[in-house]
Amino acid sequence: QVQLVESGGGLVQAGGSLRLSCAASGSIGSNNVMGWYRQAPGKERELVASFNSAGTPNYSGSVKGRFTISRDSAKNTIYLQMNSLKPEDTAVYYCNLRKLIPPRDYWGQGTQVTVSS
């Protein structure tokens, strides 16, 4: 099993910053990719940022230039630095670990990010 523990969410004013962390533990293995998703009320879960199998970060168009995904491989931890936050960034943010062979997704419990206008 894989456990993902997120932290760092909270309430911030528009224009502010937050940093999310996700620590992975358990049977992680090496053939996997990690990333961040979010789900706003009444909307589907969407990709925010992730690493591909080559280690290259990818971002959704709505956060590119404002958010930065990074990782500490030694700690099996990824981070999401969120700057210039907007009210539309308000959502529950989920950490994802995707094992590639065989394909399987693991999710964290989610952390709430609320951006006030």
Image: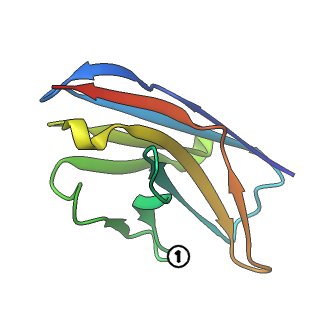
Please determine whether, in this image, residue 75 is positioned above or below residue 47: above
| Whole-percent x, y for residue 83 in the image | 20, 37
| Whole-percent x, y for residue 63 in the image | 23, 54
| Whole-percent x, y for residue 40 in the image | 42, 46
Q: Residue at x 26, y 48 (%)?
A: 67
The quarter of the rendered structure image containing the C terminus is top left
Q: How many marks?
A: 1
Outermost residue toward the front in this view:
42
Q: Is residue 109 left or right of residue 19?
A: right
Q: Secondary structure at mark 1?
A: loop
Kindly indicate the quadrant of the structure image that contains residue 20.
top left
Q: Nearer the viewer, residue 103 or 46?
A: 46
Q: Residues within 10 Å of mark 1 (few under 14, many from 20)?
A: few
> Which residue is disc 1 drawn over?
53
Please determine whether, in this image, residue 51 is positioned above or below residue 37: below
Q: Is residue 26 left or right of residue 88?
A: right
Tag 1: amino acid: Ser
| Whole-percent x, y for residue 19 in the image | 36, 31
Q: Is residue 53 left or right of residue 24?
A: left
Q: Nearer the viewer, residue 64 or 29?
A: 64
